[in-house]
Image (cartoon, rainbow, N blue to C red):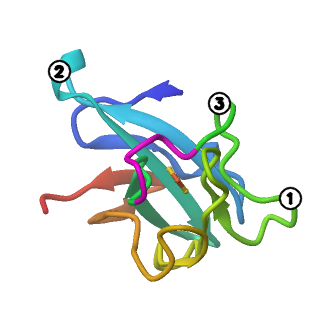
Amino acid sequence: MAEASENRICRLEEVPDGDARGFSLGESDRHRVGLIVVRIGEDVRVYENRCPHRGTPLDWAPDRFMDENSEYLICSTHAALFRPEDGVCVSGPCEGESLKRKAAKVEEGVVILLPD
Ligand code: FES
């Protein structure tokens, strides 16, 4: 998991199109927040890396967020599937719930976290 600084999460090019990468934001361990950046073309979605079912991180290995068809984000704990574009769980124990989305924008090729 890469380290982000202030509100700059990463460069867009660090996340392959149609895939996702994990980052952490925050100055101390106590305030550190795990984030998932999903790339959809030149746009991104940013979610907290926290499953709505039990609160565990989704990735089963560093930066492994997608299911085998690269169609959905998958939780490594109980295999819930989430739509990349809106974070809604479409299958699994938290079906109908959502990943917590964070406001973000891409500016000059940099993914920036915006205030909630
Ligand atoms: S903790 Fe994610 S599906 Fe159970």
The residue segment tinted magenta is: 53-58
Q: Which mark is residue 90?
A: none
Residue drawn at 59 percent across, 63 percent down: 39
Between discs 3 and 2, the one toward the N terminus: 2
In the rendered picture of this protein, how many numbered marks are placed on residues?
3
- In terms of depth relative to the viewer, which is nearer, 5 or 69? 69
| Rendered residue at 17%/28% (across/down) | 31
Decide which of tag 1 and tag 3 comes sooner along the chain: 3
Q: Position of residue 21 (x, y in %)?
A: 59, 44
Label 2 is placed on what type of residue?
Arg
SS for callout 3: loop
Q: Which residue is mark 1?
A: 68
Q: Say which residue label 2 marks.
A: 30
**Mark 1 Cα within 10 Å, few/some/many (few <14, many 20+)?**
few
Q: Which residue is mark 3?
A: 62
Q: Residue 30's quadrant in the figure? A: top left
Q: Amino acid at mark 3?
A: Pro
Helix or strand or loop: what does disc 1 sit on? loop
Describe residue 59's horizontal placement relative to residue 7 as left or right.
right
* Image x and y of residue 48, in percent: 36, 51
- Where does residue 8 sit, x and y in percent of width and height? 32, 41
* Residue 54 on image: x %, y %: 40, 49
Magenta segment, principal secondary structure? loop
Neighbour tally class for label 3: few under 14, some 14-19, many 20 plus, Cα within 10 Å:
few
The quadrant of the rendering that contains the C terminus is bottom left
Q: Is the residue under label 2 in contact with that under label 3 (CB below 8 Å)? A: no
